Image (spheres, rainbow, N blue to C red):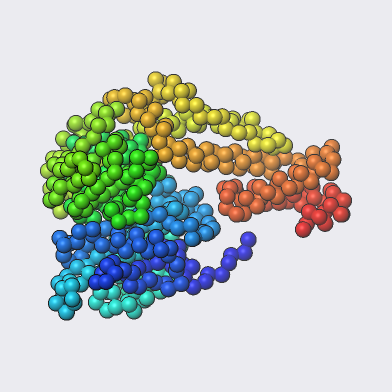
């Protein structure tokens, strides 16, 4: 298939949706001052949500510069189609780093400084990078470069930065990307599924790079230890809650702390993708606030910073929320307008009964003093590895059972439709745990079966199962195509009617088109063999049928 020409802003849109500048207007409140590129459209709801989320909800204590993240729903305004890059990413990129088709991530750089020349007495403005990519570290550094330049020199700097981004290569996993930005050169590598956890592939493969360039070791990993150090005794409880998609409210003294904590929690179940709704930063002004606080629908993960001075939640006490408080709040939060005030101390408040026992030895070792400047990085790496081993021990039995549902290769007949997967039966899976359970790879004790049953009711399980079944079904079709390419179709044609031959031609053509549209991963050799066979059996048909099939 011919590649379409690269148009202006095509490359920019691979990385960002737009750049917004939000200011405080004395008459309107928070208002969008600038949007670039100017052809980008945002719905009214998106504009309103961005404006509210671009400022700390109670910003009197946020003097200077503040950075954090938020996440909002995308409007139905956008009708996107997958590009070649999207297909390659879906094949090679970890599922946790795939483009989000239903939400935008907002990467915020907020500045508040005294300014006597303004009526309000303060300069208050935010630069927001809006993207579908969950590259939290990467875009934090990008906005850290762009925003100060904009505050000092105005709109031309933003325009220049956007034009630089429009020259960037596509975010292809596994490649070292050289990204020029405002006189700087960034070296970045998007991880692949094959990367070994805990290794910095960029440092290993990029030793001969320009010494003046800036290399970002991770595009997405937050410092787990720094984000969760106040609640270390409860990390196993939190891991379980995130794994099963239980509702959590995180309360923190600032959007920075709140968003970092949320991202640390969501990443704790990697390589699983967290699939329930979550908000790194959320305010009572958000358009979805009422939706999340009604009796009919409790949120899965709803994160509200404690600088919201009054949080009235209709019926909140009836929801089984876990409250995670990172620091003692300075104000009391009203849980219902008629009844009581919620004034928690630092810690976790939950009615959830933990299935697994905490690993006290690991927690004790993690809290030991680490020497040197990189102590947080070392402790974060240990915590990330511990979460990874725990999640992998949990997933391996599921993967092993799922593999048993795959038809044997000898059952694949090239002249029949590909066989289908056996259905996933939860009770059958539970019966395999005695001999193939997580006890084979993990020393953690507890009610693993109870945890599996809760997990199999969650959106995380539903997404994992749907994705894995789709991958296995594609594998079956690929194996079927390989078998078909090795079959003598000319001999088969001699014993078949024209209708059966035409049906075979159409089926082979459909499979080749799926490969060429990147929806199947089949070797070039197999496709070429099938194309040759397609031509051969088509030539056995009468001329009028050949003419119809050629259209």
Q: Is residue 17 left or right of residue 493?
A: left
Name the residue nearer the viewer: 63 or 369: 63
**In what quadrant of the picture does the C terminus appear?**
bottom right
> In the picture shown, does residue 539 fall above or below 394?
below
Q: Is residue 370 left or right of residue 67?
A: left
Q: Is residue 172 left or right of residue 229?
A: right
**In what quadrant of the picture does the N terminus appear?**
bottom right
Q: Is residue 267 left or right of residue 469?
A: left
Name the residue nearer the viewer: 93 or 282: 282
x then y, percent, for residue 521: 57, 48
> In the picture shown, does residue 350 fall above or below 251?
above
Q: For residue 148, what is the image quadrant?
A: bottom left
> In the picture shown, does residue 316 fall above or below 351?
below
Name the residue nearer the viewer: 119 or 70: 119
x then y, percent, for residue 142: 31, 65
Q: Residue at the spot x=26%, y=34% of the render? A: 237
Q: Residue at the spot x=18%, y=72% of the render? A: 120
Q: For residue 228, what is the image quadrant?
A: top left
């Amino acid at each position: 298939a011919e590649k379409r020409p690269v148009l202006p802003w095509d490359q920019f849109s691979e990385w960002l949706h737009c750049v917004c500048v939000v200011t405080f207007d004395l008459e309107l409140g928070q208002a969008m001052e600038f949007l670039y590129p100017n052809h980008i459209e945002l719905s009214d709801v998106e504009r309103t949500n961005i404006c509210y989320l671009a400022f700390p909800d109670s910003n009197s204590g946020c003097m200077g510069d503040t950075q954090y993240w938020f996440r909002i729903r995308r409007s139905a305004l956008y009708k996107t189609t997958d590009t070649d890059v999207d297909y390659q990413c879906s094949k090679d990129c970890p599922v946790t780093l795939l483009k989000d088709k239903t939400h935008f991530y907002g990467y915020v750089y907020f500045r508040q400084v005294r300014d006597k020349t303004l009526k309000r007495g303060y300069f208050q403005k935010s630069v927001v990078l809006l993207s579908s990519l969950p590259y939290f570290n990467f875009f934090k550094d990008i906005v850290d470069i762009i925003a100060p330049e904009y505050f000092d020199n105005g709109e031309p700097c933003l325009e220049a930065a956007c034009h630089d981004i429009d020259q960037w290569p596509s975010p292809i996993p596994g490649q070292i990307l050289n990204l020029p930005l405002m006189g700087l050169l960034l070296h970045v590598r998007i991880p692949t599924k094959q990367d070994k956890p805990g290794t910095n592939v960029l440092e290993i493969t990029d030793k001969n790079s320009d010494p003046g360039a800036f290399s970002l070791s991770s595009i997405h990993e937050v410092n787990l230890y720094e984000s969760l150090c106040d609640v270390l005794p409860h990390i196993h409880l939190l891991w379980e809650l995130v794994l099963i998609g239980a509702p959590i409210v995180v309360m923190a003294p600032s959007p920075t702390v709140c968003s970092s904590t949320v991202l640390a929690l969501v990443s704790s179940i990697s390589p699983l993708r967290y699939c329930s709704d979550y908000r790194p930063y959320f305010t009572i002004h958000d358009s979805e606030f009422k939706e999340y606080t009604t009796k009919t629908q409790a949120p899965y993960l709803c994160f509200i910073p404690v600088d919201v001075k009054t949080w009235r939640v209709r019926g909140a006490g009836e929801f089984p929320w876990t409250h995670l408080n990172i620091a003692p709040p300075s104000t009391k939060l009203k849980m219902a307008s008629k009844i009581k005030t919620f004034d928690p101390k630092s810690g976790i408040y939950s009615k959830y009964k933990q299935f697994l026992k905490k690993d006290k030895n690991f927690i004790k070792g993690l809290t030991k003093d680490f020497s040197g400047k990189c102590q947080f990085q070392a402790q974060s790496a240990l915590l990330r590895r511990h979460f990874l081993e725990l999640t992998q021990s949990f997933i391996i039995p599921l993967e092993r059972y799922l593999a048993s549902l795959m038809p044997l290769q000898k059952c694949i007949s090239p002249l029949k439709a590909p066989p289908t997967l056996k259905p996933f039966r939860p009770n059958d899976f539970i019966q395999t745990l005695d001999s193939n359970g997580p006890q084979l790879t993990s020393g953690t004790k507890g009610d693993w079966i109870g945890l599996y049953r809760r997990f199999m009711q969650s959106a995380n399980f539903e997404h994992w199962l749907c994705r894995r079944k789709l991958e296995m079904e594609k594998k079956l079709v690929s194996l079927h195509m390989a078998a078909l390419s090795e079959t003598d179709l000319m001999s088969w044609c001699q014993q078949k009617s024209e209708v059966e031959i035409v049906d075979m031609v159409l089926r082979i053509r459909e499979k080749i088109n799926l490969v060429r549209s990147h929806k199947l991963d089949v070797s070039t050799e197999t496709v070429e063999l099938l194309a040759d066979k397609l031509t051969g059996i088509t030539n056995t048909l009468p001329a009028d049928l050949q003419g119809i099939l050629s259209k």
